[in-house]
Image (cartoon, helix red, strand yellow):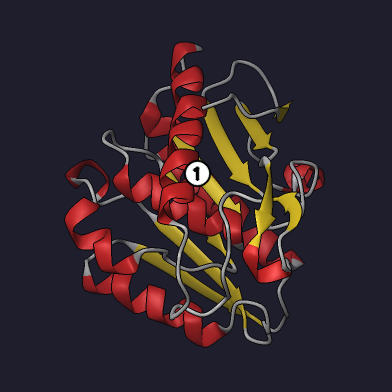
Amino acid sequence: MSALETIIIETSQPIKHSVIWLHGLGADGHDFAPIVPELDSPNTRFIFPHAPHKAITMNNGYEMRAWFDLFGLSLQHQQDEAGMRDMQKSIEAIIANEVAQGVSEKNIVLAGFSQGGAMALFTALRYPTRLAGVLALSTYVSLKEKLFEEATAANKNMPILMAHGRFDSIITLDTCLVSRRLLESLDYPLEWHEYPMAHSVCAEEIDDISRFLNKVFRAE
């Protein structure tokens, strides 16, 4: 496991909270860095890792930044379980680095868009110590059939914000709704938002993200 390169933005001192934000397939850590000033989250360190380059089966083996391989975008396609578990360790190493710098796990949010959101959910729901919350944007629960047995009790009450575009043709709303129903059936405290957009982010969503971060960080 090699350490991931990251972009770090600190809003103000002292740092009390951290947000580890995972980009989507083919993007990089720069993708969401520009929205930090809009989030009104003082005393927060935002960490934007760059995923490693991987050959993507769905894209005929073309190499791009990715958290794990993709064989297709429906829940019926094969999933890269080994790749997810390997990347889980890399993300947990970033969490450990934040803890070493004095930020408690209960003040750390995992966030992600699309494939990055799937990786954020995968890691947070299995993390052994309570985290502050998860931002799952335009995404889904991967390896959903294993969640019940692998989910940790420590994060059973962890707040989750799921947000999705009604016109998303990449990860469809129906795909996301399957994940929503799964999380609700397991009694996770889920905050759900839909927006009239495609596979993207909108201003209303950024406002909802800002409110969510302020809420979970106040709950420390």
In the rendered structure, the answer to whether residue 65 lies left or right of residue 216 reads right
Q: Residues within 10 Å of mark 1 (few under 14, many from 20)?
A: many
Q: Amino acid at mark 1?
A: Leu
Which residue is found at the position 43% from the left and 54% from the top?
Answer: 121
Residue 24 seen in render: no
Q: Nearer the viewer, residue 28 or 83?
A: 83
Which residue is found at the position 37% from the left and 53% from the top?
Answer: 159
Considering only vertical position in the picture, is 219 above or below 71? Answer: above
In the rendered structure, the answer to whether residue 7 lies left or right of residue 210 reads right
View extreme (front): residue? 61
Quarter of the image with the C terminus is top left
The residue pinned by badge 1 equals 110
Expressed as whole percent of the image width and height from the top left, the position of residue 66 reads 65, 51
Q: Nearer the viewer, residue 48 or 82?
A: 82
Count the marks: 1
In the rendered structure, the answer to whether residue 131 lies left or right of residue 152 reads right
Considering only vertical position in the picture, is 25 above or below 100? Answer: below
Residue 25 seen in render: yes
Expressed as whole percent of the image width and height from the top left, the position of residue 51 reads 66, 42
Considering only vertical position in the picture, is 41 above or below 27? Answer: above
Expressed as whole percent of the image width and height from the top left, the position of residue 24 reads 67, 56
Which residue is found at the position 58% from the left and 83% from the top?
Answer: 172
Per the image, label 1 sits on a secondary structure element best described as strand
Considering only vertical position in the picture, is 72 above or below 29? Answer: below
Expressed as whole percent of the image width and height from the top left, the position of residue 18 reads 54, 31
Which residue is found at the position 22% from the left and 66% from the top?
Answer: 187
